[in-house]
Image: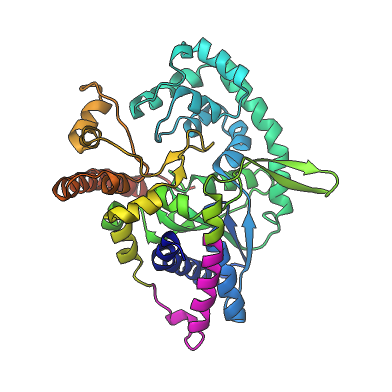
C-alpha cells in the first residue's frame, strides 16, 4: 500500500463514511424517498452510501442516485432565466481569475469573447490576474453590454432544453420527496437546480445535505440547507483548519467534468457531455476502491448497534490536524494534486503551490488588504491549500509556525465577517 493510500484510509475514508452515514440518517428522518449525490464532489460519498445501505439493508430507506451535473452545466441554462443578472453568476472570485476566464464562464465561443473584450477595452488585459474588487467592477460594463447579454441568453436557451431533458429523465420531476447531497460551501448549485425545475413544476422545492456551508444564497429558506461539519453561523475554528479546495481535489471522481447534455438517438436518452478526464484520475480510482472497502467493513462492524446510536468519529481532529497543520510529508503527498477552483477547470496547478517567503507575507491580513485596495502595489499569489504550501516551503519551524498563525488569522477574519453577514441576512432578509 502506498503512502497516500495509507493516509487516505486514516483521514479521508472515516470522514467520507461518516458524512455518508449522516446523509442517510438525515434523509430517513426527513422521510426522503430518494437522495441525489451531485457529481463530482459527492462521488466517493455516493460509493460509501451504497455500501452502507447494502449492509444495513432495510434500516435505511432512501433510493440513492448519482446525478451528473456541474456548476457550469447548470448555470449555462440558468443564464437566460436571469437576464442581465447572469453577471452575478459570472463575475465571481477565485484563484488566478482573469477577464478571459470570466468571459469563458458564459459559455460563449472564442470569437464572441474577443469581440466583447474589444468593446470593453479588455483585449490587452484578457490574461491579467484580477484582484477581487476588479472582478466586481466588471459587473456593470458586462451588464450594460447588450452584445454580451444577448449572446449569453442565446447560448443559454440552446442549453436549456437538453439540460431539462436530462433532469426530467433522471426523475427530478417525478413528484416524490427527495434531497441533493454535495460538498457544499455556498449552496448556489442547489438554488440554480431549483430555479430550473420550477420552470416545469412551480412548486419544486429542494433540500440539500452538505459537508460544510460557509454561507447560503440570499433569500432562501435556511431549513433547506443542512450541513454536516460546519454551518454558516458557527464552527469558525473548524473552518479555519479546513481547506475546501483540498476536499474537492481528493473527494472527486476520475471522470471528466460535465459541461452540458445532448440527446443520443441511438440510446434514446439524454446523456452528459464531459470534458477531459480528471488530471488526478489514477489516484482517484484507487481511492474509489478504498472507500468502498472501508465503508463495507465499517457497516459490517456496526451491525450489532442501532444505526441511530452510531456517532461521528474524530473528523474535527483528523481534518484539523491534517488540513490545518500538515506535516511536510503529508503536504508533499497530497499537495501535488492538480486543481483549479474555476467552474471550467482552467489553469490547473498543484493544490499546494510553491510560494516564496515574500509571497507568504503578502497573504497576511494587512498586506493583503493593502494590495487588494490598491494601496500597495504587489502581486497576490494564492494557494488553493495555503497550509500545505507553508508545510512544503522548506522554511525553518519557527517561520512555518508564524506563517500558519497568520494564515489562520486571515481565515478567522474572513469567516467572522461571513458569520456576521449571514446573521444579519437571516434576520433582515425576507424568505422566499
The answer to whether one can see residue 173 in this image is: yes
In the image, is residue 25 above or below residue 36? below
Can you name the residue that lies furthest to the left here?
A: 398
Can you name the residue that lies furthest to the front here?
A: 1
* Percent of width and height locating residue 33: 63, 68
In the image, is residue 308 above or below residue 41? below
* Percent of width and height locating residue 215: 39, 48
Q: Nearer the viewer, residue 180 or 254?
A: 254
- Which range is magenta? 287-312
Q: Residue at x 53, y 82 (%)?
A: 300
Left or right for 9, reference 236: right
Residue 44 is inside the magenta segment:
no
Left or right for 52, reference 184: right
Q: Nearer the viewer, residue 258 or 288?
A: 288
Q: Quadrant of residue 175?
A: bottom right
* Percent of width and height locating residue 266: 86, 46
Q: Residue at x 54, y 72 (%)?
A: 293
Predominant SS of the magenta segment: helix
Can you name the residue that lies furthest to the right here?
A: 266
Residue 307 is inside the magenta segment:
yes
* Percent of width and height locating residue 364: 21, 38
Left or right for 172, reference 421: right
Q: Residue at x 66, y 62 (%)?
A: 176
Q: How many marks?
A: 0
Q: Quadrant of residue 170?
A: bottom right
The answer to whether one can see residue 241 in this image is: no
Q: Nearer the viewer, residue 322 or 86?
A: 322
Q: Residue at x 43, y 81 (%)?
A: 309
Amino acid at each position: 500500500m502506498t503512502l497516500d493510500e495509507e493516509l487516505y484510509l486514516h483521514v479521508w475514508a472515516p470522514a467520507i463514511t461518516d458524512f455518508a452515514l449522516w446523509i442517510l440518517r438525515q434523509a430517513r428522518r426527513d422521510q426522503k424517498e430518494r437522495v441525489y449525490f451531485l457529481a463530482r464532489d459527492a462521488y466517493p460519498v455516493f460509493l460509501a452510501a451504497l455500501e452502507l445501505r447494502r449492509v444495513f439493508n432495510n434500516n435505511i430507506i432512501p433510493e440513492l442516485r448519482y446525478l451528473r451535473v456541474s456548476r457550469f452545466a447548470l448555470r449555462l441554462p440558468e443564464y437566460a432565466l436571469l437576464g442581465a443578472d447572469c453577471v452575478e453568476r459570472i463575475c465571481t472570485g477565485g484563484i488566478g481569475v482573469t477577464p478571459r476566464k470570466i468571459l469563458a464562464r458564459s459559455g460563449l465561443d472564442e470569437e464572441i469573447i474577443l469581440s466583447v473584450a474589444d468593446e470593453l477595452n479588455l483585449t490587452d488585459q484578457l490574461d491579467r490576474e484580477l484582484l477581487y474588487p476588479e472582478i466586481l467592477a466588471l459587473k456593470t460594463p458586462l451588464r450594460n453590454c447588450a452584445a454580451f447579454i444577448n449572446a449569453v441568453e442565446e447560448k443559454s436557451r440552446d442549453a436549456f432544453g437538453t439540460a431539462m431533458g436530462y433532469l426530467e429523465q433522471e426523475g427530478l420531476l417525478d413528484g416524490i420527496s427527495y434531497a441533493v447531497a454535495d460538498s457544499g460551501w455556498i449552496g448556489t448549485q442547489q438554488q440554480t437546480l431549483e430555479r430550473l425545475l420550477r420552470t416545469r413544476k412551480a412548486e419544486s422545492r429542494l433540500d440539500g445535505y452538505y459537508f460544510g456551508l460557509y454561507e447560503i444564497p440570499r433569500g432562501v429558506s435556511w431549513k433547506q440547507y443542512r450541513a454536516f461539519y460546519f454551518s454558516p453561523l458557527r464552527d469558525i475554528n473548524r473552518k479555519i483548519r479546513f481547506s475546501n479546495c483540498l476536499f474537492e481535489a481528493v473527494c472527486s471522481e476520475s471522470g471528466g467534468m460535465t459541461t452540458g447534455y445532448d440527446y443520443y438517438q441511438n440510446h434514446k436518452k439524454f446523456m452528459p457531455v464531459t470534458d477531459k478526464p480528471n488530471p488526478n484520475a489514477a489516484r482517484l480510482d484507487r481511492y474509489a476502491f478504498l472507500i468502498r472497502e472501508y465503508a463495507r467493513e465499517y457497516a459490517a462492524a456496526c451491525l450489532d448497534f442501532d444505526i441511530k446510536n452510531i456517532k461521528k468519529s474524530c473528523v474535527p481532529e483528523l481534518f484539523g490536524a491534517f488540513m490545518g497543520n500538515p506535516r511536510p510529508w503529508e503536504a508533499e503527498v497530497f499537495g501535488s494534486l492538480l486543481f483549479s477552483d474555476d467552474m471550467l477547470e482552467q489553469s490547473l496547478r498543484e493544490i499546494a503551490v510553491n510560494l516564496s517567503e515574500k509571497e507568504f507575507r503578502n497573504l497576511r491580513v494587512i498586506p493583503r488588504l493593502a494590495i487588494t485596495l490598491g494601496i500597495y502595489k504587489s502581486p497576490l499569489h494564492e494557494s488553493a491549500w495555503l497550509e500545505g504550501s507553508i508545510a512544503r516551503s522548506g522554511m525553518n519551524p519557527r517561520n512555518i509556525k508564524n506563517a500558519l498563525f497568520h494564515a489562520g488569522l486571515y481565515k478567522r477574519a474572513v469567516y467572522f465577517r461571513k458569520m456576521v453577514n449571514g446573521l444579519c441576512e437571516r434576520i433582515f432578509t425576507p424568505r422566499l
